[in-house]
Image (cartoon, rainbow, N blue to C red):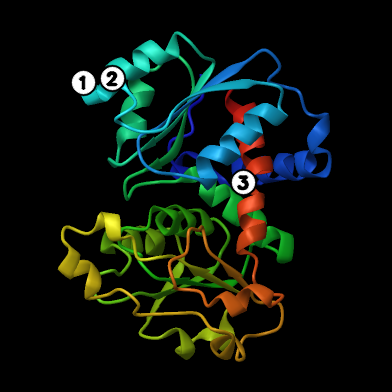
Amino acid sequence: MKHIISIKDFGKEEIDSLLARAGAIDAAPQNQKTLDGKQVALLFFEPSTRTRMSFASAVARLGGTTITVDSVEGSSISKGETLADTVRVVSSYVDAIVLRHPKEGAARLASEFASVPVINAGDGAGQHPSQTLLDLYTIRQSMPLKNIHIGLLGDLRYGRTTHSLAYALSNYNVTIHTIAPPTLELPESLVDELHRRGCTVQEHADITDIIPNLDVIYTTRIQRERFPDAASYYNVAESYRITPEILDERKEGMIVLHPLPRAGEIDPRVDELPCARYFEQARNGVPVRMAMLEEVI
């Protein structure tokens, strides 16, 4: 039985294989019915639009069906049931579980009690492997993954998407440029790990210092829900914003990505520029998650 908990569980060859399968599915999405008769539980104990709906769409396109919990209030966890017991019970109903949870490590815990495969759909500030795979897939649509310069901009402390992506990119000999407000820098432990894996990581104070050299800008929102209090959030809110004027300095072929939702960090005027790929990135969640479901079921 195979779980997908962290991008760290994948080697480069496995990532490349999944991306290739996603590409094949993308080319003929209506011809895939590999989950005919299978059922998947979508257990989302934290708000989500794109991840939950794209997993539901992926299961349906593969011929399967879903059962869903979309809040703590809508489950027996609100009555005091443990996550372990919830997972044990749900495992007897379905062929796989997709779990979103606010606590880091929740998906790993669930995999220890589940009798069916578990896919981590985001655990606190930890990992978000399905987002990482669709991010890599989107980059690969525009350029080879190797030897590129990527700027990670925004909340790099709590941003699980940037943590997963940075680790995955260390397989491809890229240079990572970090641009974050004070207190929201990439965790030192992750930077150390990236260095050990041979990845170059460079810190910058402002996006304008580095933008002419970037092949990809990966922007994230400052996640208000991760802060201990409102004052801490407002100290850094609105500290950066991608505008068409800033992008005037970009190199040819550079793309802008964002895992969405955005909250003011990308000017809507950027949407009309050819470098804006964040809506295409969201669309890519379906074929990539179809490939992931095929991998574990």
264 relative position to 29: left or right? left
- Tell which of 127 and 28 is nearer to you: 28
Dot 1, how many residues are within 10 Å of its Cα: few (below 14), some (14-19), or many (20+)?
few
Mark found first going from the N terminus, 3 or 1? 1
Mark found first going from the N terminus, 2 or 3? 2
Q: Name the residue under label 3.
A: 285
280 relative position to 240: left or right? right
- When asked about the image quadrant of residue 297, the answer is top right
Q: Mark 2 points at which residue?
A: 76
Amino acid type for the residue under numbered disc 3: Gly
Q: Residue at x 57, y 35 (%)?
A: 55
- When asked about the image quadrant of residue 53, the answer is top right
Mark yes or no: residue 73 visible: yes
Nearest to viewer (mark 2 / mark 3): 2
Amino acid type for the residue under numbered disc 1: Lys
Disc 2 to disc 3, C-alpha distance: 29 Å
191 relative position to 61: left or right? left
Is there CB contact under 8 Å for labels 1 and 2?
yes
SS at circle 1 = helix
Amino acid type for the residue under numbered disc 2: Ser
Point out residue 171 in the picture as x, y percentages from the top left corner.
54, 55
Q: Name the residue under label 1.
A: 79
Point out residue 190 in the picture as x, y percentages from the top left corner.
33, 59
Disc 1 to disc 2, C-alpha distance: 5 Å
